[in-house]
Image (tube, rainbow, N blue to C red):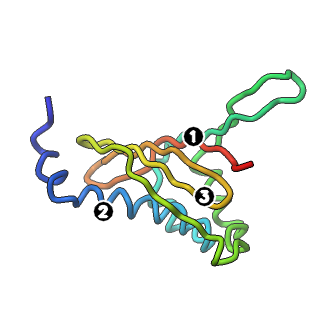
Amino acid sequence: MTNPKYAKTEKTGEDRKAVRQTVLDYIEAWYQGDPDRGAQSLHPDLAKRIVRFDKESGQETLDPMSAERLIERWGSGDGKTTPVDNQKKEITLLDLQGGMASVKLETAAWTDFMHLARINGRWVIVNILWERKK
């Protein structure tokens, strides 16, 4: 059953715009080295993960990154070294239902699959599974 308080905003597209803006804040914070802007896009309990090969065990494992660590990475300014012509930020809204959304963000160097939630009227990123491009 659809929650009636969400039905109107989905039809107007306001949620779609807000979700897109949240993802833009996330990626542009990287390219601009702006941790304050990026922090606004994240839930404090963000779970960002990548599958990595562990040479010691010979197994693939999940390597986590917290919201705090991600904000530190934005503050490092490393993303500002990306040439403007290479600052790809292709956002695809995969699904939006009620107060949750699924988004694919493609950059020149990696792809993020994200889950966002509307919490207290604001869209924030709660989960990211990402992979570097080969």
Callout count: 3
Determine whether label 1 and label 2 are within 8 Å by CB.
no
Locate residue 29 relative to residue 134 in the image: left or right. Answer: left
| Secondary structure at numbered mark 1 | strand
Task: Quadrant for the N terminus, please.
Answer: top left
Q: Which residue appears at 65% of the width and 51% of the height?
A: 69
Residue 91 or residue 34, whichever sits in front: 91
Contact? badges 2 and 3 (CB < 8 Å): no
Q: Residue furthest right?
A: 56
The nearer-to-camera label among 3 and 1 is 1
Q: Within 10 angstroms of label 3, few (less than 14), some, or many (20 or more) residues?
A: many
Give percent across and percent down for residue 123: 34, 53
The first of marks 3 and 1 along the sequence is: 3
Query: Disc 2 versus disc 3: distance between alpha carbons?
Result: 23 Å
Q: What residue appears at the point 32 percent right and 60 percent down from the top-left corner? A: 18
Q: Amino acid at mark 1?
A: Leu
- Marker disc for residue 129: 1
